[in-house]
Amino acid sequence: MNNLANKTAINNQFLTLLIKITGIAFLTEFAVSICKDSGETAIANKMDMGGKVVIVSMSIPIISGLLETIVKVLP
C-alpha cells in the first residue's frame, strides 16, 4: 500500500484513514444487521448513528486537506 501511495503522491496518512474508515463502516453495518435480525431496531439505529458520527469525525483531516487543495487551485 505504501508503494502505491508513493507512486500516486497520496498522503500515507490519508490512505491509512480511508482504510480505517472503511473497516469501521463494515463493522458498523455488520453490527446493525445483527441487531435488526434479533429484533432490536432501536439499538440498531443508535449504532448506525454512532458509526456515522465516528466516520465523520475521522474524515475531518481528509475534508480539510481537500478544502486546502481547492483553495490553492482557485485564483
Image (cartoon, helix red, strand yellow):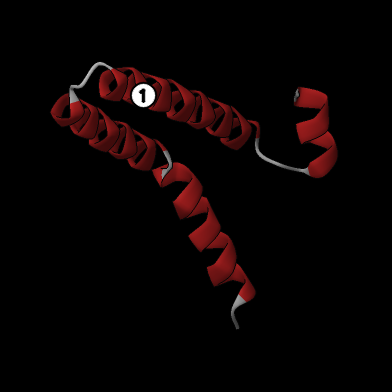
Image coords of residue 18 (percent x, y): 56, 34
| Tally of marks | 1
Residue 75 left/right relative to 21: right
Quadrant of residue 12 within the rendered picture? top right
Residue 45 left/right relative to 61: left
Q: Which residue is mark 1?
A: 33
Quadrant of residue 44 within the rendered picture? top left
Q: For this rendering, which residue is in front, 23 or 29? A: 29
Image coords of residue 54 (percent x, y): 32, 33
In the rendered image, the quadrant that contains the C terminus is: bottom right
Residue at the (18%, 22%) spot, across then down? 40
In the rendered image, the quadrant that contains the N terminus is: top right
Q: For this rendering, which residue is in front, 35 or 13? A: 35
Image coords of residue 42 (percent x, y): 14, 30
In the image, is residue 56 above or below residue 32? below
Give SS at disc 1. helix
In the rendered structure, which amino acid carries the disc numbered 1?
Ser
Q: For this rendering, which residue is in front, 10 or 33? A: 33
Q: For this rendering, which residue is in front, 29 or 12? A: 29
* Residue that extends furthest to the left in the rendered view of this protein: 42
* Residue that extends furthest to the bottom in the rendered view of this protein: 75
Residue 45 left/right relative to 69: left
* Mark 1 residue crowding within 10 angstroms, few (<14) / some (14–19) / many (20+): some
Quadrant of residue 38 within the rendered picture? top left
Residue at the (48%, 31%) spot, across then down? 21
Residue at the (32%, 31%) spot, across then down? 51
